[in-house]
Amino acid sequence: MPATDTPGAKEALVNRYIDLLMAAETHENQKSFLGNLAYIDGESMRKYKNAFRYLSREDQDDLLHLIAYPLSGSTWTGEGAGADPGFTNFDQLKTHITMAYYTSQIGMKELGRDDNFTHGVYQGCEHSDGSHK
């Protein structure tokens, strides 16, 4: 999540949060997450001959746009889409990053939450007889 008119994932320390979460995950989930990252890096090497992190912002965007949407089948032949590892890996990474971002202080603020957890006294409901329950 790049910074735009709001802070991005880097400012929200998403990488540190994901590292912390992955340290507590099962070996299987850790392996899956690392596999998602490896897929993106592998595609970057295949297409651009360089690791994803060293690509220009434009090339990163280009690669992610190629895999961000699932392949669709042919409407002309009626053939369904096959397995789409690009979309699957991208979608899983996107889920981890989005969850980490929006549970950070910066992400919560972007959602309109403030640090006031109590928001005043809960009034309950008033019944026609004037009682509170």
Image: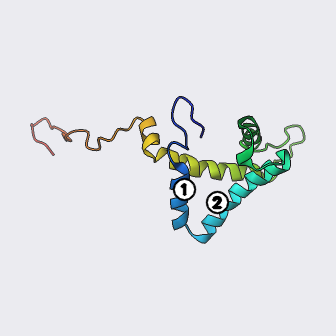
**Relative to 27, 113 lies left or right:** left
Q: Secondary structure at mark 1?
A: helix
Q: Residue at x 53, y 28 (%)?
A: 5
Q: Position of residue 64 (x, y in %)?
A: 72, 42
Quarter holding the N terminus is: top right
Residue under numbered circle 1: 18
Q: Secondary structure at mark 2?
A: helix
Q: Residue furthest left?
A: 130
Q: Residue at x 51, y 45 (%)?
A: 101
Q: Residue furthest right?
A: 77
Q: Is residue 35 above or below residue 107?
A: below
Compare residues 19 and 65 and report the one nearer the observer: 19
Q: Can see residue 111?
A: no
CA neighbours of label 1 inside 10 A, class few (<14), some (14 to 19), many (20+):
some
Residue under numbered circle 2: 33
CA neighbours of label 2 inside 10 A, class few (<14), some (14 to 19), many (20+):
some
Q: Nearer the viewer, mark 1 or mark 2?
A: 1
What whole-number distance in Å separates the C-alpha atoms at marks 1 and 2? 10 Å
**Relative to 45, 99 lies left or right:** left
Could you tell me if the residues under marks 1 and 2 are in contact, i.e. CB atoms within 8 Å?
yes
Q: Position of residue 45 (x, y in %)?
A: 81, 51
Compare residues 11 and 126 and report the one nearer the observer: 11
Q: Position of residue 79 (x, y in %)?
A: 86, 46
Which quadrant would residue 118 be assigned to in this image?
A: top left
